[in-house]
Image (tube, grey):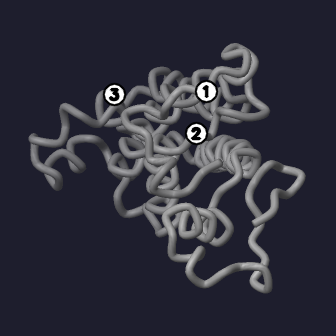
Amino acid sequence: VSTQSTGRPAMKASNMNPVAFFSPTGLSTALKCSVGLDRRSLALFRVLLGWTIIYDLWDRSSDLETFYSDEGILPRRLVMEGLGDSRAWFDLYLSTGAMFWLTILFCVHTMFGIFILVGFYTKTFTLLAFIFQHSLIWRVVPLAHGGDLYLNCLLFISNLLPIGDYYSIDALLSKGERTPSFPFDIRPVLCVD
């Protein structure tokens, strides 16, 4: 077993002893080489996730009054009748139908995307973006598609990964200290270096 320039172990099949492969360190090395993640690639993932949120909201903003306000084709009253009153208290976008407040919600949601893009308090704003995105989808369920569900899943999984460790404001503020991910550290499961 040798080490690459990145510090990650590199396995060479010709030099690997079959008995050493099944030892705890050999198996760990094999896992890191086959399914390991580099935190720099997670930084790229974070940037693309932020751009996706911003673009999605920009695309939806052209139809803000038509689909999200009470003057549009699907007022909140009809949505609440379809969902029942049990979900209405949680959905932020169902809390108002006025264009002013919907514009404020969209701007705040866009700010969360920008904060994820630059990596500022990444865990906090990823969780908030997940809540806002979920609420946005439930506001107009007939407009939801597979991409919305996929974006929600990516936002949820992002809370479990150290996406703010490299090329972010979080990395500058932490000054090289690496802290476990909130709410728990999933890095050993995914072999993240």
Is residue 84 left or right of 107 when viewed as pictured? left
Give percent across and percent down for residue 175: 73, 15
Amino acid type, label 3: Thr
Give percent across and percent down for residue 56: 62, 49
Is residue 167 left or right of 71 when viewed as pictured? right
Q: Cα distance, mark 2 to mark 3?
A: 34 Å
Sooner in the amino-acid sequence: mark 3 or mark 1: 3
In which image quadrant can residue 153 be found? Answer: bottom left
Q: Which residue is at 85% across, 57% downward?
A: 4
Nearer the observer, 38 or 91 = 38
Give percent across and percent down for residue 170: 67, 22
Amino acid type, label 1: Arg
Q: Is residue 102 above or below residue 192?
A: above
Q: Cα distance, mark 1 to mark 2?
A: 9 Å
Nearer the observer, 155 or 97 = 155
Q: Which residue is at 34% across, 31% downward?
A: 92
Asked if the residues shown at circle 1 and circle 2 are in contact, with their CB atoms under 8 angstroms apart, the answer is yes
Sooner in the amino-acid sequence: mark 1 or mark 2: 2
Q: Badge 1 is on which residue? A: 178
Instruction: Provide the secondary structure element on which disc 3 rests.
Output: loop
**Residue found at the far right of this picture:** 5
Q: Badge 2 is on which residue? A: 162
Tell me, yes or no, if residue 136 can be seen here: yes
Tell me, yes or no, if residue 58 can be seen here: no
Q: Which residue is at 58% across, 22% downward?
A: 121
**Quadrant where the image shows the N terminus:** bottom right
Asked if the residues shown at circle 3 and circle 1 are in contact, with their CB atoms under 8 angstroms apart, the answer is no
Amino acid type, label 2: Pro
Give percent across and percent down for residue 59: 65, 50
Q: Is residue 160 above or below residue 109?
A: below
Q: Badge 3 is on which residue? A: 96
